[in-house]
């Protein structure tokens, strides 16, 4: 079990500062040349959730990607920048996202390659807990080294999204909606995410925590300056460190619960080997969490049937703000449960079929979806 997490200060995305911080981070990790050899192909699996400018703090910042690309290229390796974001996994869809998120500019400036391979492939994974066979974008297996660059954010469904959740973007396009539908319970969904992380096994995972997002993440929350970069060879350890830093206990984050149960990470932040900065400087700076994180499973052990009863009563629901909606229909097209209908260019959901994955909120470019809790939920989970 790898317990080492490298955390370095980085207060801005200014080129010189992020270049220096990235170099210090890799140097403390032992140097990139311990992971990459000349001539190898390196995949940078970034977070490109949706068509958002870098300043929105929704996606991996291009200045960080550029700094990492430059240091990989200095070794003599080739770089491919890739993700399968929300929506269809097609050239037209990706083209706009690459441009808006700044990845196109990074590729033009550095000579790094953007991924245009939209094929998918099935891979056997008998040791998986949920997935015995995993369907992934083919680009994952076309490289020698995988480096994942996650973004520190809260999340409406999983409460927290970071190192492990970032690898969900290796699942191609709309198949992610199928996974949401098949594993609509947060426990199963989180186990599935851990399966994917254990199959992909990035050699290095980096956390973009210079500017993060709190509240209604992963796309509609508030920006929050954290001023840190971090890296680890164990994505679960990286998530444990940052959940501690933003005031979340492992018991609140189901991906961490599953990783702890599987023996992939310690159950206590104090057991991590923090390098690059003093452990005492990583004191919790509590983040605002999504409304959905204060609802659902009762935070005490209960029989499964009773836990499920409370979950069904207390779980929150999406609410569409028609005044903000422009009628693009993105929510309806990407709803895993197909419970959203567009009527006169406005979305309406059949909540009896809603699986509460909150993909509608996650993918709405206009912040026209909010998560609302019922009165009982607000009383119990203040």
Image (cartoon, grey):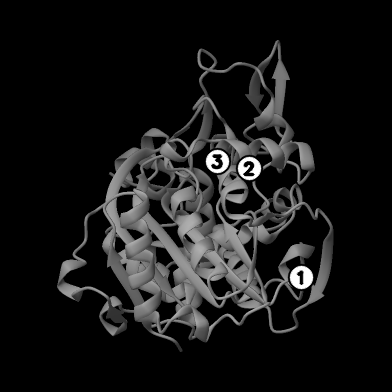
Please indicate, yes or no, whether residue 331 appears anywhere in the rendered image: yes
Can you tell which quarter of the image residue 342 is in?
A: top right
* Circle 1: element type: loop
Q: Which residue is mark 2?
A: 98
Q: Position of residue 56 (x, y in %)?
A: 43, 37
Drawn side of residue 49 relative to residue 176, left or right: left
Q: Marks 1 and 2: in contact by CB < 8 Å?
A: no
Which residue does the image show at 33% across and 72% down from the upper left? 24
Can you tell which quarter of the image residue 75 is in?
A: bottom right
* Circle 2: element type: helix
Q: Callout 1 environment at 10 Å: few (<14), some (14 to 19), or many (20+)?
A: few
User: In the image, which disc is placed on residue 258?
Assistant: none
In three-dimensional space, the C-alpha distance between marks 1 and 3, rounded to whole angstroms, equals 24 Å
Q: Is residue 166 above or below residue 23?
A: above
Drawn side of residue 138 relative to residue 269, left or right: right
Q: Position of residue 32 (x, y in %)?
A: 48, 78
Along the polypeptide, which appears first: circle 2 or circle 1?
2
In three-dimensional space, the C-alpha distance between marks 2 and 3, rounded to whole angstroms, equals 6 Å
In three-dimensional space, the C-alpha distance between marks 2 and 1, rounded to whole angstroms, equals 20 Å
Q: Which residue is mark 3?
A: 101
Question: Quarter holding the C terminus?
Answer: top left
Q: Is residue 321 above or below residue 185?
A: above
Q: Is residue 218 above or below residue 247?
A: above
Q: Marks 3 and 2: in contact by CB < 8 Å?
A: yes
Along the polypeptide, which appears first: circle 1 or circle 3?
3
Q: Position of residue 76 (x, y in %)?
A: 60, 74
Please indicate, yes or no, whether residue 249 appears anywhere in the rendered image: no
Which residue does the image show at 71% across and 67% down from the upper left? 140
Q: Which residue is mark 1?
A: 142
* Circle 3: element type: helix
């Amino acid at each position: 079990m790898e317990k080492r997490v490298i955390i370095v200060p980085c207060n801005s995305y200014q080129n010189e500062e992020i270049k220096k911080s990235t170099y210090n981070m890799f140097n403390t990790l032992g140097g990139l040349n311990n992971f990459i050899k000349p001539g190898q192909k390196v995949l940078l699996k970034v977070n490109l959730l949706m068509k958002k400018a870098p300043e929105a703090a929704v996606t991996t910042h291009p200045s960080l990607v550029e700094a990492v690309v430059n240091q990989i290229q200095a070794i003599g390796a080739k770089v491919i920048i890739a993700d399968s974001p929300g929506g269809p996994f097609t050239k037209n869809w990706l083209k706009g996202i690459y441009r808006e998120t700044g990845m196109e500019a990074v590729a033009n400036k550095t000579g790094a390659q953007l991924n245009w391979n939209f094929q998918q492939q099935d891979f056997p994974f008998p040791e998986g807990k949920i997935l015995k066979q995993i369907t992934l974008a083919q680009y994952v297996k076309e490289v020698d080294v995988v480096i994942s660059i996650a973004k520190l954010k809260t999340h409406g469904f999983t409460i927290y999204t970071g190192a492990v959740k970032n690898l969900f973007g290796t699942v191609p396009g709309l198949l992610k909606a199928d996974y949401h539908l098949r594993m609509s319970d947060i426990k199963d969904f989180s186990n599935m995410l851990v399966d994917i992380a254990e199959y992909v096994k990035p050699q290095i995972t980096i956390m973009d925590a210079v500017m993060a997002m709190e509240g209604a993440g992963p796309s509609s929350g508030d920006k929050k300056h954290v001023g840190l970069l971090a890296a680890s060879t164990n994505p679960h350890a990286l998530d444990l460190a940052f959940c501690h830093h933003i005031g979340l206990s492992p018991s609140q984050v189901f991906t961490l619960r599953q990783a702890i149960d599987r023996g992939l990470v310690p159950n206590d932040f104090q057991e991590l080997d923090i390098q690059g900065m003093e452990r005492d400087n990583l004191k919790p700076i509590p983040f605002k969490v999504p409304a959905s994180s204060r609802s659902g499973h009762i935070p005490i052990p209960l029989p499964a049937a009773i836990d499920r009863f409370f979950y069904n009563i207390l779980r929150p629901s999406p609410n569409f703000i028609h005044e903000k909606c422009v009628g693009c229909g993105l929510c309806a097209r990407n709803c895993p449960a197909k419970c959203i209908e567009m009527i006169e260019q406005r979305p309406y959901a059949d909540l009896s079929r809603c699986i509460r994955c909150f993909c509608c909120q996650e993918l709405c470019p206009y912040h026209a979806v909010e998560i609302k809790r019922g009165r009982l939920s607000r009383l119990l989970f203040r």
